[in-house]
Image (cartoon, coloured by chain):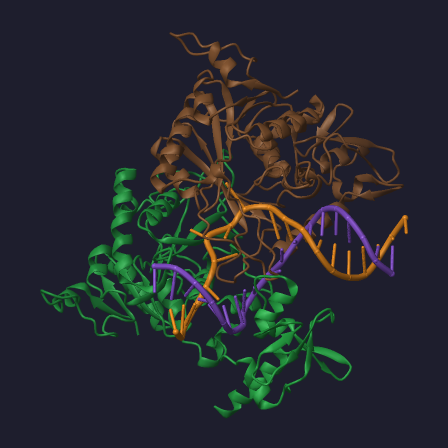
Chain colours: A green, B brown, C orange, D purple
Amino acid sequence: MASVFPLADLKASVKSDSRPDSRPGSWVDTIIKGDCVSALEALPSHSVDIIFADPPYNLQLGGTLHRPDQSLVDAVDDEWDQFASFEAYDAFTRAWLLACRRVLKPTGSIWVIGSYHNIFRVGATLQDLNFWILNDIIWRKTNPMPNFKGRRFQNAHETMIWASPSAKAKGYTFNYDALKAANDDVQMRSDWLFPICNGAERLKGEDGKKAHPTQKPEALLARVIMASTKPGDIVLDPFFGSGTTGAVAKRLGRHFVGIEREQDYIDAASARIAAVEPLGKAELTVMTGKKAEVRVAFNVLVESGLIKPGQVLTDAKRRYSAIVRADGTVASGGEAGSIHRLGAKVQGLDACNGWTFWHFEDGQSLRPIDDLRSVIRSDLAKAE
Amino acid sequence: MASVFPLADLKASVKSDSRPDSRPGSWVDTIIKGDCVSALEALPSHSVDIIFADPPYNLQLGGTLHRPDQSLVDAVDDEWDQFASFEAYDAFTRAWLLACRRVLKPTGSIWVIGSYHNIFRVGATLQDLNFWILNDIIWRKTNPMPNFKGRRFQNAHETMIWASPSAKAKGYTFNYDALKAANDDVQMRSDWLFPICNGAERLKGEDGKKAHPTQKPEALLARVIMASTKPGDIVLDPFFGSGTTGAVAKRLGRHFVGIEREQDYIDAASARIAAVEPLGKAELTVMTGKKAEVRVAFNVLVESGLIKPGQVLTDAKRRYSAIVRADGTVASGGEAGSIHRLGAKVQGLDACNGWTFWHFEDGQSLRPIDDLRSVIRSDLAKAE
DNA sequence: CCTATGGATGAATCGTGAT
DNA sequence: TATCACGATTCATCCATAG
């Protein structure tokens, strides 16, 4: 499934005077081997829906660290995590974020994860490049590594920044209602609790050692992808590593593009993704709120006979009343207008949702006219 | 108690060829009126033990925001939170952090609190100035304001950065053992759960409205100060506001210095601090090292105010009693330790469950402190 | 006296599409 | 680009008032 798409081939398709390969699909669901920025520059503009980036953390470790029992802590000391200075790290960050900005759709958004070693520099650079921060999200670890020396608080979280390409870019996907429903019907907070990636989920090499030093848990990526993409969207991960982003994207019915320099990681990620079984359409249907539903105007209720001209509407406490007119407007006292305008007017407010404010008599009880709109929508759905 | 120390007077004591007023005490436990940087420059070098800073967040709010019920959200739109650009905010940040660096002892540390609007810039500037980040700490709010429009995750936390003056400055105070003992004998994590400041603790003006728009909860400052200072230390707050830092410092037997521009805030903070009763020495003794054999999980009750430092606990039959100290340990006779150890000790047993052994007065009756732990746990469960 | 209920509010970068 | 209409959208807590 996850074929490797060599950067050289991709570059070969670049015409001298235009952007490369704008055919959708040729680079989709592949892992591009190569340097992050070069590979990004070879992708078409505005071609991916979200980006999830887990860049090098620029850990500045003094020497080796031992546990109280004298065992050695296997620290992240890979070559790719070494930078000469903050300036060098900032330049690197700026370069890959700029390259990401071009590839990202205006309706897209970007996630970056990091720790206190690098996340402040990443956040400031995002702002400098006019990305617009939507949230910072805290991944609280249920099982973080202890602080062995007892000189600091246990570092028990990592930080993710979620941003849109600009302050004006409000078209990003956010599946608010699905998240709320999944969270016991209260809105999802900015602090998320997940275990670190361990056990069977953790990729192992032939030597039984962890295949990648910073493999992220699939649950974390699942929430990110479910929150900010639609099925069929393209998810780009410019630091693909062990391929968690690709595996979760495939499972959730999204497409992925990975960029990775090291062949060992590409091999591990390819095998991992090939083994993933995508979920079916039914499981992937995202719960949506009212704003995604078909628009039904008030006069449709009048025209359909569910509300009759001359009928009296009141608010839930019968403090205000209005009479329905044949043209789908309502009137009260000397005022008349839409259900929303009149609702606002009688209450002395700037705005009002007339659908939930106005009620009608239904036998003994009062029911909001929104109930009747649901009836119409249900009929429309059957007719589809 | 909290006298106002006018910046003009302080500057008058500056000799032309030397640093100002190095007599300890003249500026201690006062609120200096004036601009943050100017006031800092008038203080002696290396004179304070920790700094807690709650700088302007540089919120960039579009227009007005209404709740679903059409009521208006009272936003932070004060003049002091307005900056022309990120560059202007960075220059401001750099200036006050540089001034703080000079005033801070080499054995000291600095805390800065912020949100995603400003904390990344603050963190990057701290690193640029060679401060050494020790932890980033997440204040998880039990009761944050919702996201009313359903366009983002509920912004349910703020971030604090804790840093020493340089990578080599390892002399900072960190009361590891006391924190661990107070946290059910596991090390204190980087994510802290506290309610926002509300109710009786929130300072109100004569009009009944909040006296300051961003008053921080005392429990938060209590954990900061208990973690990173010793009794008698000097705590500097360059953005004093409603004086939470001063009030908690005084209660915990530390000295404070506040800097604040607005007379209304100075007046409110002065009155507030004057009403604070410091705790006694016994309550303030901090556990150090393993020889004290501390084992407790009790300080959340103290920080939350369910149990007050100095409060007396007894067993169910009032045969034994103990006094609660601010660091979450308890004392009786010449003995002190965790609720479990002391309970065992007074009974002459090897072990004891302090949660069910120790009781507190609740009106006419005695109730086990475990009941209060249930209250906390209930709050925690809700916050998850 | 207690309990029930309604209103108020907290560091907030908070809509979309047609005209 | 500005304006307007449509109509979607909140959690925990404290306090005042009613019953």
Residue A1 vs residue B57: left or right? left
From this view, report whether residue A112 is shown above or below residue A371. above
Q: Residue at x 79, y 41 (%)?
A: B357
Q: Residue furthest left?
A: A16
| Quadrant in the picture for the N terminus of chain A | bottom left
* Towards the viewer: A183 or B107: A183
Within the image, what quadrant is residue B180 found in?
A: top right
* Towards the viewer: A362 or A41: A362
The picture places residue B223, in percent across and down from the top left corner, at 60, 35
Residue B335 vs residue A149: left or right? right
Q: How many marks?
A: 0
The picture places residue B167, in percent across and down from the top left corner, at 38, 30
Is residue B251 visible from the viewing direction of this image?
Answer: no
Q: Residue furthest front?
A: A334
Q: Residue at x 84, y 32 (%)?
A: B320
Q: Residue at x 41, y 21 (%)?
A: B102
The picture places residue B218, in percent across and down from the top left corner, at 63, 36
From this view, report whether residue A99 is shown above or below residue B87. below
Is residue A163 visible from the viewing direction of this image?
Answer: yes
Q: Residue at x 37, y 41 (%)?
A: B84
Residue A66 vs residue A184: left or right? left
Within the image, what quadrant is residue A77 found in?
A: top left
The picture places residue B121, in percent across and down from the top left corner, at 39, 41
* Towards the viewer: B13 or A128: B13
From this view, report whether residue A2 is shown above or below residue A157. below
